[in-house]
Image (cartoon, rainbow, N blue to C red):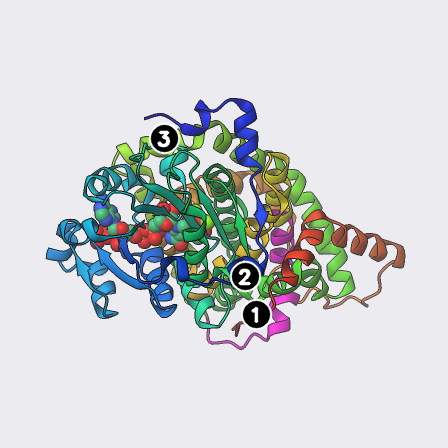
Amino acid sequence: MSNYFNTLPLREKLNQLGVCDFMDSSEFLDGVSALKGKKLVIVGCGAQGLNQGLNLRDSGLDVSYTLRAAAIEGKRDSWKNATENNFNVGTYEELIPNADVVINLTPDKQHTAVVNAIMPLMKEGATLSYSHGFNIVEEGMQIRKDLTVIMVAPKCPGSEVRAEYVRGFGVPTLIAVHPENDPQGKGLAQAKAYAVGTGGHRAGVLKSSFVAEVKSDLMGEQTILCGLLQTGSILSFDKMVEKGIDAGYASKLVQYGVEVITEALKQGGITAMMDRLSNVAKVKAFEISEELKDIMRPLFQKHQDDIMSGEFSRIMMEDWAAGDKNLLAWRAETGETAFEKTPAGDVKITEQEYFDNYTLMVAFVRAGVELAFETMVQAGIKPESAYYESLHETPLIANTIARKKLFEMNRVISDTAEYGCYLFDQACKPLLADFMKKVDTDLVGKNFNEGKDGGVDNRTLIDVNEAIRSHEVEQIGATLRKAMTAMKAIKTA
Ligand SMILES: NC(=O)C1=CN([C@@H]2O[C@H](COP(=O)(O)OP(=O)(O)OC[C@H]3O[C@@H](n4cnc5c(N)ncnc54)[C@H](OP(=O)(O)O)[C@@H]3O)[C@@H](O)[C@H]2O)C=CC1
Ligand SMILES: CC(=O)[C@](C)(O)C(=O)O
Ligand SMILES: [Mg+2]
Ligand SMILES: [Mg+2]
């Protein structure tokens, strides 16, 4: 097998990277009917497996789980997840031969082995589905020609696929049909029905390609979504402790702050998030986020370049071959950070205080979202896709940090995302060392407005507002959010 993307001629690379059609709600009037009465068998019952299955069942579809024999015999967590939720569970031999759609929701590093094990058992003309195209795009997996290969990729962690559905909303979803595997032409109808089944159509569905999904998904998770939220959280906590802010207060501000701040982002973009600051704080946050963008731009570009060239997947696959040596070591290190080890203090922090006392995080988020968006678009990813991946998903990742900090975030995201998150974090911290030396408690830990009279230069404020509002991520965001009429506000700390 070899990297599928790298075997394509340039025009075809560009072609597939550019596939991105926002699907109008009228495209989903058939609901789940293309999958109704069909046997959907999910392989694996982890973060995506369990939560997608719950949504699909609640949408009236026939869902069961197949697990490797050892997981069933050992009654492992995946077996418990499925059986405690009253799903039918069986071995590959028991369930795959009758499945109309086999949904592969095992970790990316297992895909080649899993697909090689299940493919011979699949019935003629069945469908194989993925939620991330790594195996097809980066490893060049070849699928039997009678099988249809689709992708339904929710732009968020599995836990939030469920949480948003239960709230009556959904998460933006990329769907695709692999051009090499659509013998009956039914792939698109099935992928659409599946996206309705998970609730994705209420938030927005893009008709994408395996290539466009992989090259954007890897970029988002490594940089703004997971990498930068990790780096920003740790640096913020350490700074507060260094400057004598109570550690319990610092822990609480960082754990919940990013969720509160990015809730405004989700509802009204960078503009709404920045508008939560006083005028003086907004001007300052704008200035430091411009500085942060200049410092971090080369790192964002390096991540995108390595993703496009296949260098990222090459080094990650080396780690797979080494039994996840680096991943496991980095995971353990994350668990040992002072932020992770310091419980949130029993102090009241009001919703507004999270903005006023954590201006630094507002600046990190603006810088990271805009940089990720700009870098993706420059690399040929379409703005709609870049918006979901950089802006809309950030609050959904922040929800996992609010739940149980960074170790939890890294547990819930895929191993692929986790590996890339650590790579970014390790490169970003030294890059920000000089910047962080200048940061004081007015930006993190104390109210930025304290001791200031609140006055700003009108011209400066007008220019700042204009720069924020005219960014392309705000333009496309305003359009895409118009379709999100069912969006629910979430209860933050
Ligand atoms: N995590 C997320 O939020 C997101 C993930 N995705 C994609 O979804 C897919 C699934 O990822 P994720 O939900 O994180 O995976 P998890 O690690 O949470 O779940 C893995 C499941 O697969 C099973 N499994 C592991 N190894 C094997 C194996 N060799 N053979 C059979 N079953 C195995 C595990 O069960 P057991 O070990 O007990 O057998 C477990 O039930 C990936 O393609 C990922 O990129 C996409 C969007 C977001
Ligand atoms: C949660 C999600 O969308 C990720 C970050 O892409 C993943 O877990 O791989
Ligand atoms: Mg993703
Ligand atoms: Mg991912």
Residue at image coords 69%, 44%: 291
Q: How many marks?
A: 3
Residue at image coords 57%, 42%: 433
**Label 2 SS:** loop
Among numbered discs 1 and 3, the one appearing first in the sequence: 3
Q: Is residue 395 visible?
A: yes
**Label 3 SS:** loop
Disc 2 and disc 3: Cα gap in Å? Answer: 31 Å
Please state which amino acid type lies under the numbered disc 3. Gly
Residue 366 belongs to magenta span = yes
Disc 1 and disc 3: Cα gap in Å? Answer: 38 Å
Numbered badge on residue 486: 1
Numbered badge on residue 142: none
Q: Is residue 246 visible?
A: no
The residue indicated by pointer 2 is: 203
Please state which amino acid type lies under the numbered disc 1. Ala
Within 10 Å of the Cα at label 3, are there few (<14), some (14-19), or many (20+) other Cα atoms?
some
Tell which of 205 and 187 is nearer to you.
Answer: 187
Residue range of the region highlighted in magenta in the rendering: 345-368
**Label 1 SS:** loop
Disc 2 and disc 1: Cα gap in Å? Answer: 8 Å
Question: Where residue 254 sits: x, y (%)?
Answer: 52, 62
Residue 164 belongs to magenta span = no
The residue indicated by pointer 3 is: 140
